[in-house]
Image (tube, grey):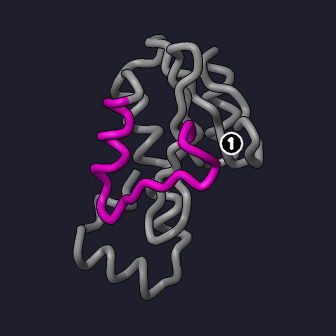
Amino acid sequence: MDVDTARQYLLGKPEASEDFPFGPDVAVMKVRGKMFATLSESDGQGRMNLKCDPDQALALRDIFPAVLPGYHMNKKHWNTVCLDGSIPLGELQRMMDHSYALVVKGLPRAVCEGMLVRHGREIISH
């Protein structure tokens, strides 16, 4: 998966938006103002930071050499994923879905319930 494909997938999430609070080289994907991913490219290598359940974060780091502790993030809850082609597309999408779902679940109850009504349970089922 390249950076453009990852960006399209992340922004395809319900109510997702893109911001550049850290400068033009790092896209921050948010839902309702809360970050669920960052996306950048350096020397032709794409990277994204994704929120993750702490136990799952450790397991993913053990399974995939391209998954590292979150760069400039809380390493317990965030992974950096190198878009080097070594992780299957379906697994990358699952990781992005999981990050988004964790953030939606953490939104205030009324906001989360409103999103569920508008977009369905699939937004938090990952």
In depth, the one of 11 and 117 nearer the eye is 11
Place of residue 122 in the rendered image (x, y in percent of width and height, measured from the top left)? 29, 59
Q: Residue at x 29, y 61 (%)?
A: 14
Q: Residue at x 56, y 37 (%)?
A: 25
Look at the picture and state if 34 lies above or below 2: below
Q: Amino acid at mark 1?
A: Asp
Q: Is residue 8 magenta?
A: yes
Q: Residue at x 25, y 79 (%)?
A: 117
SS for callout 1: helix
Magenta residues span 4-26
In depth, the one of 61 and 33 nearer the eye is 33
Q: Which residue is mark 1?
A: 55
- State the quadrant of the N terminus: top left
Look at the picture and state if 42 lies above or below 53: above
Q: Residue at x 52, y 75 (%)?
A: 107
Q: Residues within 10 Å of mark 1 (few under 14, many from 20)?
A: few
